[in-house]
Image (tube, helix red, strand yellow):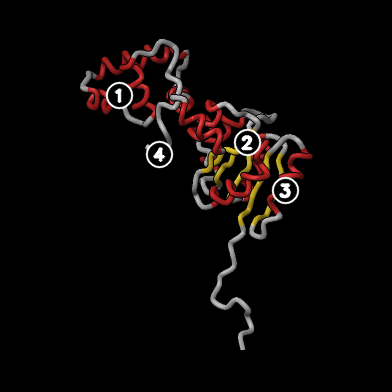
Amino acid sequence: MNMSGNAGEAPNAMIRIVIADDHAVVRSGLRLLLEAEPDFEVVAEAGDVEAARRYVRGHHPGVLVLDLNMPGGSSLDAIPVLRNEAPETQIVILTMQEEPAFARQALSAGAIGYVLKEAADAELVEAVRRAAAGETYLNPALGARIAREPPPGPPDDLSEREVEVLRLIALGHTNSEIAEQLFLSVRTVETHRSHIQQKLRVSSRAELVRYALQRGLVNTDE
């Protein structure tokens, strides 16, 4: 006699989730939506960016559902910080921002999913499930717009050569490595780097990397 009922079948692993949105009623609705899934567990709710960071560090969830517009700092700026602090946690953006530029910036910063709030009922469960499996999810209508629209080019009067240098800086190459790849002298690379920093009004490599990511000059898979 089979006493187990489902012998040989392993139970689904629970997907642990933190919700970050500054509206309590939205968080309650999202919790109800997500916990209707038998393998989803919402372990914490955050109302601002700092609380989101704290709960992610404390609970180590598989997925963070993160609103783009919250108090306590920029959610976009927090994405790479969160990915660094908790690399096991995948980030799904849930937002009202329909502009392709926001989606590009969020995905470049390290988010793996981008869902519009107006489509949350239909899409969020799938986005969370894909994120937990390490797969990207992008709102289909927004994805179609991104496919039709070329990514914005770098403003601030950067030359093509300066864009090449900036891209290699963002990818972590040293001045010597950049010089070798572009068949330039190290001094010329240093000059280009100085001009780039002047045009962009930045002074650190971290700021150059952020600019390159936001403008879509590099992607996180390179």
The N terminus, quarter of image: bottom right
Q: Earlier in the sequence, mark 1 or mark 3?
A: 3
Three-letter code for the amino acid on which mark 1 is drawn: Asn
Q: Earlier in the sequence, mark 3 or mark 2?
A: 3
Q: Which residue is mark 2?
A: 116
Q: Which residue is mark 4?
A: 221
Three-letter code for the amino acid on which mark 2 is drawn: Leu
User: Mark 4 and mark 3: span between their CA atoms?
Assistant: 32 Å
Q: Which mark is residue 175?
A: 1
Q: Earlier in the sequence, mark 4 or mark 2?
A: 2
Q: Secondary structure at mark 3?
A: helix
Check the image and report above or below for 140 versus 186.
below
Categorize mark 1 by other alpha carbons within 10 Å: few (<14), some (14-19), many (20+): many
Three-letter code for the amino acid on which mark 4 is drawn: Asp
Three-letter code for the amino acid on which mark 3 is drawn: Arg
Residue 88 or residue 120, whichever sits in front: 120
**Left or right for 23, reference 92:** right
**Left or right for 90, reference 172:** right
Foreground: disc 1 or disc 2: 2
